[in-house]
Image (cartoon, rainbow, N blue to C red):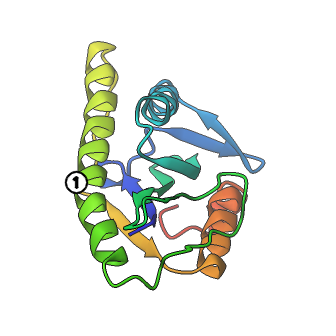
């Protein structure tokens, strides 16, 4: 679907990526690689829009929007600077089918490339690291939910001690 929140965990929730000090993320060498690979992925994949992400000690949140061409040819995109995304042709009968098809083609490829690149670079640098297999994702259906998820991602470091994965 259009907006997805991806949640990648490290193997057995080991804190490979960072530490949190006074609500601030302090990246480890592995976390720095994750940061660089997210930045590289955003730059290389113009077919996605990154609406927010955060690297935590043992997981990463990444909010991605996937533009899709509508039957009228207008590109539907999220505006990274906007809290609310509107869909001008959401009521078209094929809108969600096309969006779902594009998501299934795009998302697994990008996630696989991202996770593989991080793992490869860690091995090249003799850094102990592994991802948990798979990932958790959530389809965001409304501007209200998008706002909540963006706020959660932004505040995740401040709330680390209350996190289920702490």
99 horizontally vs 153: left or right: left
Taking depth in this image into account, of 164 and 147 the one nearest to the observer is 147
> On the image, numbered disc 1 is attached to which residue?
105
Taking depth in this image into account, of 106 and 63 the one nearest to the observer is 106
What residue is at 54 percent from the left and 48 percent from the top?
50
What residue is at 28 percent from the left and 50 percent from the top?
106
Q: Position of residue 161 (x, y in %)?
A: 64, 63
What residue is at 27 percent from the left and 75 percent from the top?
97
Q: Quadrant of the N terminus?
A: bottom left
- What is the tally of numbered marks visible in this picture? 1
Taking depth in this image into account, of 59 and 112 the one nearest to the observer is 112
Task: Give above or below for 11 relative to 1.
Answer: above
Task: Give above or below for 38 relative to 166.
Answer: above
Visible residue check, residue 132: no
- Residue 78 figure quarter: bottom right
Mark 1 falls on what kind of element?
helix
Taking depth in this image into account, of 133 and 162 the one nearest to the observer is 133
Q: Position of residue 5 (x, y in %)?
A: 47, 63
Task: Give above or below for 122 relative to 21.
Answer: above
What residue is at 54 percent from the left and 57 percent from the top?
77
Q: Position of residue 86 (x, y in %)?
A: 61, 72
Visible residue check, residue 2: yes
Q: Residues within 10 Å of mark 1 (few under 14, many from 20)?
A: few
Q: Position of residue 109 (x, y in %)?
A: 24, 45
Seen as rendered, the residue at the extreme top is 125
Seen as rendered, the residue at the extreme right is 22
- Residue 88 figure quarter: bottom right
140 horizontally vs 156: left or right: left
């Amino acid at each position: 679907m259009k907006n997805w929140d991806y949640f990648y965990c490290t193997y057995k929730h080991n804190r490979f990526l960072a530490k949190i000090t006074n609500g601030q993320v302090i990246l480890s060498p592995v976390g720095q690689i994750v940061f660089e690979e997210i930045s590289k992925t955003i730059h290389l994949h113009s077919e996605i829009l990154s609406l927010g992400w955060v690297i935590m000690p043992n997981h990463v949140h990444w909010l991605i929007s996937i533009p899709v061409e509508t039957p009228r040819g207008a590109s539907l995109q999220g505006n990274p600077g906007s809290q609310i995304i509107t869909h001008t042709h959401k009521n078209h009968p094929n809108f969600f089918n096309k969006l779902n098809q594009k998501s299934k083609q795009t998302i697994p490829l990008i996630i696989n490339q991202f996770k593989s690149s991080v793992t490869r670079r860690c091995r090249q640098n003799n850094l102990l690291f592994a991802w948990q297999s798979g990932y958790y994702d959530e389809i965001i259906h409304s501007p209200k939910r998008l706002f909540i998820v963006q706020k959660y991602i932004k505040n995740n470091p401040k709330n680390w001690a209350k996190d289920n994965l702490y």
